[in-house]
Every structure is written in structure tokens, then in C-alpha cells.
Amino acid sequence: MEHVLMVGALLLFVAVLAGKVAYKFGAPALLLFLGVGMVFGLKVVHFHSFELTQVIGMLSLCIILFNGGMDTKFSDIRPVIAPGVILATLGVILTAFFVGIFAYFFCGWIGLAISPIVALLLGATMSSTDSASVFSILRTKKQGLRENLRPMLELESGSNDPIAYIMTILLVSVATTDGSAGVWDTIFDFFVQMIVGALVGYGVGRLAVWTNNKIDIKVNPSLYSVLLLAFVYFSFSFASIAWGNGYLAVYITGLVVGNNRLAHRNNLMTFFDGFTWLAQIILFLAIGLLVNLDELLKPEVLVLGFSVGAFLMFVARPLSVLISLLPFRHFTTKARIYVSWVGLRGAVPIIFATYPILGGVENGNLLFNVVFIVTLLSLVVQGTTVSSMANWLGLAYEEKESLFQVGIPDNIKSNFAEIEITEAIADSSNTLKDIKLPDSTLVVLIFRDGAYFVPKGNTELLVGDRLLVVSDRSEEELQQIYEQMGITEIAKLR
């Protein structure tokens, strides 16, 4: 037992160091976690349990999706709900269809005999973008994206797993029952799963918020995190029992929790951020340990994997995005290109690729290894160029990190913001008392030259000073006032 703990601790330690190295060189940390798992699987740990990997995947994805939803402000995704949902539904179906058609004819061309259903199953398993990869890379880069692209990409990746899951389960059933599954039954099941999953997610989210705010466990505030963790798995379990989609339910529960008043929010956010990283590390390590290098390096697997990967990145994903975003003419061509490029694949397709193996589908191992290669290719090629592609297309802007990391309880109604002094303000107002701030508004801290200090009325203001401002005015009113004053750099702290 001691040896098992030692190996587990060593895996986590090496994975964290790999993540630091990845950030330094601009590579996705999740790719390094996957690599660490593969190395240990070859030399140290012999782990080939698809069943256990599925369980790890389910537990980890619940945490990843919930935290992604909790970190997402509804005000950010409201303008992009329509394109995000269409990408998460129609876009996924189109991607699965295009990849399946290509795989079927390409396999016939190279002499691999697979049925049309198995080819479509291959497309279905890798049809969704991976929430763990997208959330991790976009948020780690600290890079702003124009045209509301980041919330749309996060909405898509957080909500497109359910339809990929449903298609995968359906096609596994068709492949193992000689096509006896009914088309109308399948369509009915899809809508039931989506509607029930959404309703359960919303209901459990509201219940979680109410319980968290009403229950009194102030003697040990750390238990609030345990309480909310229980609701995460309640959401998944209740939705699954009621024939709904658990992954959609968990994501919506996170959205509801994150966009309502929540007691001990800062402690909860810190806990789930750390726990999400742990879940991602364990998930990618487990997947890396699962790989059989002898099967992965077979010529037919390599040829099919790289060909399908290239087709997915350069044809299937762009074509699906182009069709899905046709009704939304406000997106520029550059924005559509970028959305096409950030179709990252990661842990979810690999987890879905275990279902054909456990279901006894013919060529199940081939599908798993091909999906693994496509995922590696996506993380290496797309994952390492997320920032550079945004810069090249002119869609990126510098997202300044807030200098005032203040924990503001939800029961405080005042608005906190960080503003930067511009030349226009410094020229017209030499001191703090000269600034025409609205009533019920105070400057409580100033950051200058690496130091913080409490200002006085006669404090001289310099260009580049960052001010922590608290006000009882509404956000919309403050935004207008700041803009009239010539302040463009405004960071909300709630």
C-alpha cells in the first residue's frame, strides 16, 4: 500500500512540475499531464482498466463542468447563447457526420474494413470540444478575446458533451444490435435527456444555493465546500436516474450557483478551482496510463489517426462552424476562423472512446487508439497556438489582472471596481479631491510602483495609478460616469 501511495504522490508531483514547464513554454498543461501518464504507464505502472477510467472520467468531468459553469457570468454568455447552443448541438452533429463519412471512405482506400456505423461512431466520439482543455487553456493564458469569443467558446465546450455522449451511446447500441434501434425513439430520447437534464440542473442549482445560504455551519466553514460538492453529484445522479443527461445537468447547476448570491463564495471558488485542477490532473494521468504503445504505433493506426486528425482540424470543424454560424452575421470572418481553430479535443473524446470497447463493438480498440492520436495531435497543434492564432487574427487584447484581490461577500451590495488614471484625468485633476467622483463613491486604495497605500484628499494622482473604488451606485451608472471622465481601464471585482 505504501508503494501505491508513493507512486500516486510522485505522479501528482511530476504532473504539477510539468504544468509549470508547460506554462513557461506556452504548451497546454494538460498535454504534459497526459505525457507523464504515458511515461509512467510504460515504465512504472501497469494500468489497463477501461471500466475504472470511465468512472474516473465521470467523477472528474462533473467537477470540471460544474466549476466551468460556476466561473461563467450569465451576463457574459447572454449575448452569445444562440450561437453557443447551435455550435454545441448542430455543430457537434455535423462534425460527427463529416468525420464519419471521411473515415469510412479513407479506411476503404487504405484497406481497412469498417462498417458505416463504426465510422460514424468514430466521428461521434470526437465530435465535441473538450471542456477541460478549453477552460484550462483560455483561462490560463489570461488573454482577452474580442467579439465575445471566449464566453461563447466556453459555453460551447461546457454544453456540447451531452449530444456527443448521446450519439456515442446510440451508435454503440446500433453497432451491437444490428441496427435495430429506432430512429424516432432515438430522437425522442435525445430531447428527453436534454430537457430533463436542463430542468434537473436548474432545480438542483437553486436548491444548492438556498441550502448553502440557509444552513448554519459557521463553526466549520470548510464544510460548505463539502456540501456544495454533494450537490454536484446529486445533480448528475438525479438527472441520470430521471433519464436526463447528467453532464448537462452539472454544467447548468454550476451556472445557477455561480450567478446567484452565495454565502462564503470566495472560499468555495478557491476550493473548486484547486479541486478542478486535481480532477484534470488525475483524469489525464489515468488516460495516459491506459495507453498500449504497441497498439498505438501500428502503421494503420498512425495513418488513420493522423489523417482523421488533419481532416477534423482543417475541414470538418471549420465546415461545421461555418454552417452553424451562418445566421449570425455580426461575427467577422476572422472570428469564424478562430472559433474553427479552437476546436480542442482532450479527455472527453478518449473517455467516450472507451464505450465501444466495453460495449463489444467490432474494431473498438482501433477506434480508441485513433481517438487518442487525434487528441494528441489537437493538443499539440491547436493547443499550443491558441494565443498566437488570436494575435495573428487581431482578436486578442491584453487582459490586465486585477491588482486588488479582495474577497467581497455577496451580502455587501456596494460595487467594487479597479480603475486606471489616464493622462486626461491627471492633467485636469492634480489631486484626489479634484476628481469629480459621483456621490456615495470612495477611493480606498491606490497602487503605484509596486506598493499599495491609503490615499488622502491631497494625494497627487499620476498617470498609471490603479485605484480601488467602492460605490453604492449601479454598475451601469458608474460605467457611464467613468467613460465620461475618460477612464477606459475598468475592472469589476465581483
Image (tube, helix red, strand yellow):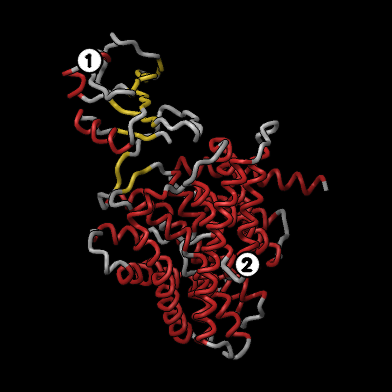
Quadrant location, the C terminus: top left
Measuring 43% from the left and 74% from the top, which residue is drawn there? 93
Task: Name the secondary structure under disc 1.
Answer: helix
Residue indicated by mark 1: 434
Measuring 47% from the left and 46% from the top, which residue is drawn there? 259
Q: Are marks 2 and 1 in contact (CB under 8 Å)?
A: no
Three-letter code, disc 2:
Ser
Residue indicated by mark 2: 240
Q: CA distance from mark 2 to mark 1?
A: 61 Å
Q: Is residue 446 above or below residue 205?
A: above
Residue 327 is at least partly visible in this image: yes
Residue 420, image x, y percentages = 29, 27
| Residue 285 placement: quadrant | bottom right
Residue 311, image x, y percentages = 39, 72
Q: Earlier in the sequence, mark 2 or mark 1?
A: 2
Measuring 46% from the left and 29% from the top, which residue is drawn there? 405
